[in-house]
Image (spheres, rainbow, N blue to C red):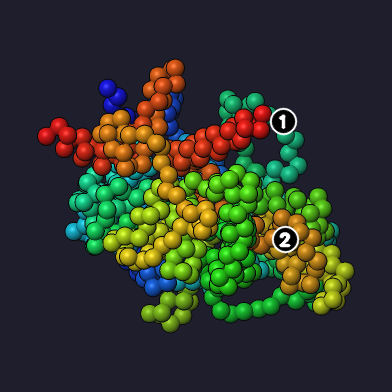
């Protein structure tokens, strides 16, 4: 069988319909984890199967797709997923944030603000924000339904008592519209303030069979305490390539003396700024 | 001036080309055919069909060839292919009473109607490397006797007549399909059995072994292990009756477990059940032991806190495609999360050092 013999965007229409129903339910109850019958995809669980299924379910042939991993368009897994959709859906692809209708991401929100009509699809490894406090799914579902989030607040408090700060740097838990505590996927907490945005945000966890969503302009608050307010942090440097001081930075080791350099993790943002300077 | 690493696309293409070359190995050695794998690596093919949840020996053999013999990778290929197939219905339950048995042994009765048939088993081979096989694998024809024309009823049915064995609830309804509905807990026994039959052989074996060593011990005897072909029948709506759509080989294991009774149940024997595609008896026996361990609640037994009794633990961790994917994903770039951890550790260290200095 040739790849072109598969249905548009790989999944059959029945499966897409099932996923769309889960997405709609997720949008109707922001932050609530909707179980869905995740399929086995031709890439491994843990490598974006949830995001790929969500993207496949929302994609139409006229869409333009962008895929980033760690903010970059050219990391190997981003390349692999982009190619998958080029092959199975034949959609146009782009590296430019403002030209994409659907952006699938792993661990970053693009620096450039999304606009209405854009969809940001997150790949989620562990959708349950309470998982590392309570391993049982039966228990955590109960805690969500009873709005029983004391355990999470105790954890954050213990961090402060022990370390003087909340020791969570990524996958920093948020509260959605004052109701569900949600894992924003392992984005750095620098990205958390951007979770309230004009675009639609969809979260897909394939292995864990969960989908959740944030409609545009949803109120998303990072958990904190009055006397220890949430702080979005990044490396205290400027990008070594474009000079940006407002973007999230990757740290590189550039020689065997251990010299460091910082550069934007969002490659499209960085390239755009470099072009502007050159022009 | 530093230039960021580019060229992911080219690297991927070249890696794939190299992989293909490695799969082929030394081109002066004859290439393996799919038919050779199907006929001579049968037990590997069976495992791939069982854990891939797709009964197709040719596709399983192809997957083994493509995966260079990595069976979990082969299972993965089959599962991904399976996703593209429509579900057009459910078969009637297969009738293993009418199995054409290649092998049928009981550890509980010396003899029973239908007799004991060893079949093609490794059991009593001495595990000595056969160096002759390195040069020549041709074999003489095995002696044959005519197949018995008597039926081979299940051994359990004899215990059933005396009401010594726990009665099993019967249901005519088609159970949920684990691959079409999300697993939600507590799961029905039908769903648990579906998860176990496609679960990783090593994982299910380890769980079963742990019950034998005392983690929720349930004293299992193999009442019967049978391997053979059964017919698969399905109702065809246009015809209005059931027709045979094919024949599959299955391994079925029924264990009989000692049980002294509980608050809710009288003393009786209880059952564990294993049913797996192909000739896969290690897996079928393991499955029966784990099935029995998971039934503690229904039988009113104590929760010993053993891993094999924990439905959530077993069902969420028995699937090797889920496990291997998530395990191996830690090879992917994690620059962003790691960077944020780096910042945090530096900050916490700085503060801790300052406190220490102030104290000194």
Q: Give the CA distance from mark 1 to mark 2.
A: 38 Å
Foreground residue among A219 and B252: A219
What residue appears at the point 36 percent right and 38 percent down from the top-left corner? Answer: A249
Query: Which is nearer the N-term, disc 1 or disc 2?
Result: 1
Which of the two marks, 1 or 2, is nearer to us in this view?
2
Circle 1: is it few (<14), some (14-19), or many (20+) Cα within 10 Å?
few
Image location of residue B250, percent across then percent down: 60, 58
Foreground residue among A264 and A24: A264
State which chain disc 2 sits on: B
Residue most toward the left? A279
Image location of residue A137, percent across then percent down: 59, 62
State which chain disc 1 sits on: B
Image location of residue A26, percent across then percent down: 41, 68
What residue appears at the point 74 percent right and 50 percent down from the top-left corner? Answer: B209
Quadrant including the N terminus of chain B: top left
Which quadrant of the view contains residue B134?
top right
What residue appears at the point 28 percent right and 26 percent down from the top-left corner? Answer: B3
Foreground residue among B168 and A141: A141
Q: Is residue B39 left or right of residue A255?
A: right
Give the label on residue B128, or none: 1
- Circle 2 sits on which residue? B309
């Amino acid at each position: 069988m040739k790849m072109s013999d598969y249905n548009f965007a790989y999944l059959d229409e029945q499966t897409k319909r099932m996923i769309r129903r889960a997405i709609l339910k997720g949008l109707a109850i922001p932050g609530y984890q909707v179980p869905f019958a995740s399929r086995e995809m031709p890439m491994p669980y843990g490598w974006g199967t949830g995001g790929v299924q969500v993207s496949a379910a929302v994609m139409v042939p006229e869409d333009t797709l962008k895929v980033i991993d760690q903010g970059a368009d050219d990391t190997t897994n981003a390349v692999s997923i982009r190619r998958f959709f080029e092959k199975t859906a034949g959609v146009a692809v782009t590296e430019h944030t403002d030209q994409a209708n659907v952006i699938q991401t792993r661990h970053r929100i693009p620096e450039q603000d999304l606009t209405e009509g854009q969809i940001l699809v997150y790949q989620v490894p562990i959708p349950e924000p309470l998982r590392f406090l309570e391993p049982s799914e039966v228990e955590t579902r109960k805690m969500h339904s009873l709005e029983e989030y004391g355990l999470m607040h105790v954890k954050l408090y213990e961090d402060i008592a022990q370390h003087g700060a909340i020791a969570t740097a990524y996958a920093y838990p948020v509260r959605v519209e004052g109701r569900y505590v949600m894992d924003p996927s392992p984005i750095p907490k620098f990205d958390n303030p951007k979770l309230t945005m004009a675009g639609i945000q969809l979260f897909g966890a394939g292995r864990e069979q969960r989908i959740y969503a944030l409609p545009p302009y949803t109120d998303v608050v990072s958990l904190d305490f009055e006397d220890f307010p949430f702080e979005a942090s990044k490396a205290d440097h400027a990008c070594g390539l474009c000079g940006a001081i407002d973007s999230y930075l990757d740290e590189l080791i550039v020689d065997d003396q251990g010299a460091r350099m910082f550069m934007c993790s969002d490659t499209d943002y960085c390239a755009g700024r470099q072009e502007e300077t050159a022009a | 001036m530093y230039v960021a690493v580019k060229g992911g696309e080219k690297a991927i293409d070249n890696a794939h080309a190299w992989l293909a070359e490695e799969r082929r190995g030394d081109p002066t050695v004859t290439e393996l055919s799919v038919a050779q794998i199907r006929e001579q690596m049968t037990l590997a093919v069976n495992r791939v069909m069982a854990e891939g949840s797709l009964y197709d020996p040719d596709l399983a053999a192809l997957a083994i060839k493509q995966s260079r013999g990595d069976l979990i990778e082969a299972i993965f290929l089959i599962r991904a292919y399976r996703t593209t197939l429509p579900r057009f219905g459910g078969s009637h339950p297969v009738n293993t009473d009418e199995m054409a048995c290649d092998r049928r042994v009981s550890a509980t009765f010396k003899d029973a109607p239908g007799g004991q048939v060893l079949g093609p088993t490794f059991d009593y081979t001495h595990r000595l490397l056969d160096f002759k096989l390195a040069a020549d694998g041709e074999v003489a024809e095995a002696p044959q006797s005519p197949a018995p024309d008597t039926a081979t009823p299940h051994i359990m049915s004899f215990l059933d007549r005396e009401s010594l064995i726990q009665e099993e609830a019967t249901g005519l309804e088609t159970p949920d399909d684990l691959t079409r509905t999300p697993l939600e807990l507590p799961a029905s026994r039908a769903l648990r059995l579906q998860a176990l039959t496609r679960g990783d052989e090593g994982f299910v074996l380890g769980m079963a072994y742990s019950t034998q060593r005392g983690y929720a011990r349930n004293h299992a005897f193999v009442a019967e292990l049978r391997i053979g072909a059964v017919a698969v029948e399905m109702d065809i709506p246009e015809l209005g009756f059931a027709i045979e759509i094919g024949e599959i080989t299955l391994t079925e294991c029924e264990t009989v477990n000692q049980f002294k009774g509980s608050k809710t149940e009288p003393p009786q024997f209880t059952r564990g059940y294993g049913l797996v595609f192909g000739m896969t008896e290690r897996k079928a026996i393991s499955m029966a032991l784990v099935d029995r361990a998971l039934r503690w609640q229904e039988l009113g037994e104590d929760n010993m806190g053993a891993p094999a009794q924990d439905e959530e633990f077993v069902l969420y961790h028995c699937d090797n495609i889920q496990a291997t994917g998530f395990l191996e994903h830690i090879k992917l770039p994690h620059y962003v999360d790691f960077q944020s951890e780096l910042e945090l550790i530096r900050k916490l260290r700085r503060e801790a050092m300052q406190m220490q200095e102030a104290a000194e």
